[in-house]
Image (cartoon, rainbow, N blue to C red):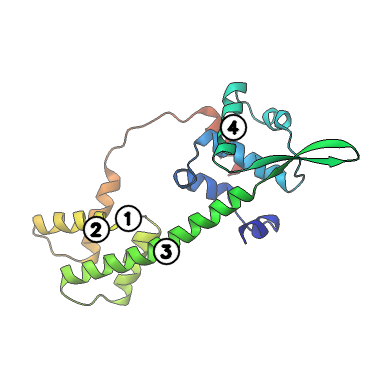
Amino acid sequence: MIKKLYEKGYFDYKNFILDNLKSLSINSLEAIILIKILDNYNNSNTYNPLDLRGELSIRRDSFENALSNLVEKKMYEIYLTQENDISKEVISLDGFFERVEEIINDKQSFDVDEIHSIITYITKEMGRVLSSSEIDIITSLVEDDRYVKNDFINAIESINTSKRRLTIRNLSLELAKKDDKPKEKKETPSYVKDFIKSIK
């Protein structure tokens, strides 16, 4: 399914990969190389690492290590074909497309179960049935902002401790405080910055 969407140009694989590095178990350099492979795959399924490296300003050892890691993680595989007595290296990205489908299915299952559990918990804490608009807000907090049940539990405990009224608005504000805490800044490698600029 995902492969067919990709072949027809309907799958935004660039943003999917950048948004799901952790789920794909790849780092930023591996992501950039995988995106480049996907960029070229529809034009030709042949594989030439020299051409690929020529498109990126990456040290040879880092490039080769990242390629090796992508193969080990089953993001793609290489095999030989014979054409007019000439051997060609051909690439298959079926492993990547299968992993994408697994991630999407896992997220859908997680969201439904997680949302139900969170709504049940909040309903109990508030002592009343939630309105449809309140349920929509909670659903958005889980699906879009990726808050999990433990985040809601901590936020409600903080609201109760401060003796504020437990409302969906106060709950949303308390959850947002978690994101306002200072985070350790890490310098983004220049090749990552350049790549992100190129796809915007």
**What is the CA distance from the residue labelled 2 to the residue labelled 3?**
19 Å
Query: Quick check: 121 left or right of 12?
Result: left
Q: Name the residue under label 3.
A: 109
Q: Is mark 2 on a helix, strand or loop?
A: helix
User: Residue sitting at 76 percent across and 46 percent down?
Assistant: 43
Q: In this view, does 70 lie above or below 111?
A: above
**What is the CA distance from the residue labelled 2 to the residue labelled 4?**
41 Å
Question: Mark 3 or mark 4, which is nearer to you?
Answer: 4
Q: Mark 4 points at which residue?
A: 68
**Kind of residue sitting beneath label 4:** Ser
Which disc, if any, is residue 57? none
Q: Is 181 in front, or is 18?
A: 18
Q: Is mark 1 on a helix, strand or loop?
A: loop
**What is the CA distance from the residue labelled 4 to the residue labelled 1?**
34 Å
Q: Is mark 4 on a helix, strand or loop?
A: helix
Q: Can residue 162 be seen in this view?
A: no
Query: Quick check: 130 left or right of 111?
Result: left
Which disc, if any, is residue 147? 1
**Horizontal and vertical percent for residue 16?**
53, 50
Give whichever of discs 3 and 4 has the lower sequence position: 4
Verify CB contact (< 8 Å) between mark 3 and mark 4: no
**What is the CA distance from the residue labelled 3 to the residue labelled 1?**
15 Å
Give whichever of discs 2 and 3 has the lower sequence position: 3
Q: Is residue 22 above or below residue 159?
A: above
**Horizontal and vertical percent for residue 94?**
64, 50
Verify CB contact (< 8 Å) between mark 1 and mark 2: yes
Question: Mark 2 or mark 3, which is nearer to you?
Answer: 3
Give whichever of discs 3 and 1 has the lower sequence position: 3
**What is the CA distance from the residue labelled 1 to the residue labelled 2?**
8 Å
Q: Mark 2 points at which residue?
A: 152
**Kind of residue sitting beneath label 3:** Ser
